Amino acid sequence: MNNNKPIGIFDSGIGGTSIWTEIHRLLPDEKTIYLADSKNAPYGQKSKAEIIALSCKNTELLLDMDCKLIVVACNTATTNAIQELRANYNVPFIGIEPAIKPAATHSKTQTIGILATQGTLNSELFNKNVEKFHNTKIIEQVGHGLVPLIENGHINSPEMTKLLYSYLSPMIEANIDYLVLGCSHYPYLIPQIKKILPAHIQIIDSGEAVARQTQNV
């Protein structure tokens, strides 16, 4: 990148720090500003209009700090608001979307699972993406309750374990061989998820891909 202005990154809380970590690993000399909108977390059950309004507010805060590029480190905000952001602000945006393509392309059972927020699964952008892979059975599961537990530091709690078992068991029974994490908070749950999933099921999140895309801007 050709100037010393910072890269802005925002998410509805701490989830996007997993993406910030990947960006910092690939671009250690770049200045970054991370905006965690924990006050309004989670975004997943908000309306599209609310998500757009919050995303615009976050963008304007980062632009006020002279950011040269904005990473929308939130699946829900990306799938519901990034087109609006690109249309209204004169700055490059990079978003994060559930990595359906690599999972569907490499699945041997032609059955994959996705764990995401209601806002992501309901979005037009997500469903257009799903339609491209009509030969793959995609089992969608809303991760109700996961983000608040993560935000409050209850990653290893019995309640978290109970929720994960209830969400993942039907996917295991359906013979998935890939699990797509469709929320930037969910990589923090990978150790717990691995305890539940059979070893052959691979877990995919989009953090590294977003960091590489940021590197190439």
Image (cartoon, helix red, strand yellow):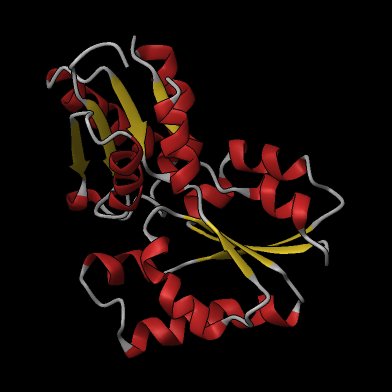
* Outermost residue, left side: 65
Instruction: Name the residue: 44% across, 22% down.
Output: 84
For the C terminus, the quadrant is top left
**How many numbered marks does the figure carry?**
0
At x 51% / y 78%, what residue is drawn? 194
- Placement of 198 over or under 21, stated as above or below: below
* Quarter of the rendering containing residue 92: top left
Asked which quadrant contains residue 146, the reply is bottom left
Q: Nearer the viewer, residue 120 or 4?
A: 4
Residue at horizontal 20%, vertical 39%?
34
Percent across and percent down for residue 28 are 25, 36
Compared with 117, 197 (above or below) is below
Q: Where does residue 177 sit, x and y in percent of width and height?
A: 72, 69
Determine the residue located farthest toward the right in the rendered image.
135
From the top left corner, tell me how far across and down residue 201 is, in percent.
66, 72
111 with respect to 154 (left or right): right
Dividing the picture into quadrants, the one containing residue 169 is bottom right
